[in-house]
Image (tube, rainbow, N blue to C red):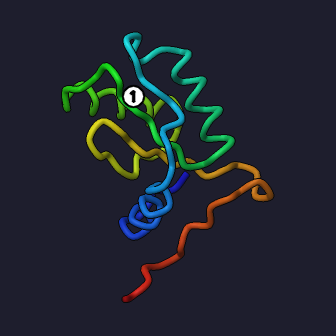
Amino acid sequence: MEKIKGFQRRFLRGLAHSLKPVVFVGQKGFSPTLVKAMDEALDRHELVKVKFVEFKEKEKKTAMIQKLEKAVNCDMVGLIGHTATFYRQQSDPEKRKIVLPARAVKT
């Protein structure tokens, strides 16, 4: 997967604004169950919000986000408070729901 550009992140954050968190990170933190839930959610939705219930410290959240990005092969597009937004393009072109803009739209 190629790296997402800044204007594409902004586009994805706009799409994610109305979404509710689908995956919750609790006491167990980073686990095979969390990785499986993230993988399934990204396959289904492409854009997923993750709520950190237990990990309130910024350093712990950042470490967890980096582990998730590597384990699930996705990109974090935004972090507001205790909710992070992740994106991974659907591998099957026919199932893709989100089309990233090729270049920035000038306003």
In front here: 17 or 75? 17
User: Looking at the image, which residue is at 47% across and 45% down?
Assistant: 86
User: Looking at the image, which residue is at 60% across and 23% down?
Assistant: 36
- Secondary structure found at label 1: helix
**Residues packed near mark 1 inside 10 Å, few (<14), some (14 to 19) or many (20 plus):** some
The type of residue carrying mark 1 is: Lys
Picture coordinates of residue 43 (x, y %)?
67, 41
Q: Where is mark 1, residue-wise?
A: 67
User: Which residue, as the protein is rendered here, is positioned at the far top?
Assistant: 28
Counting every numbered tag in the picture gives: 1
Q: Is residue 98 left or right of residue 50?
A: right
Q: Is residue 31 above or below residue 9?
A: above
Q: Is residue 88 above or below residue 65?
A: below
Task: Report the quarter where the C terminus lies.
Answer: bottom left
User: Looking at the image, which residue is at 77% across and 54% down?
Assistant: 95
Picture coordinates of residue 83 (x, y %)?
36, 39
Q: Is residue 87 left or right of residue 98?
A: left
Picture coordinates of residue 39 (x, y %)?
60, 32
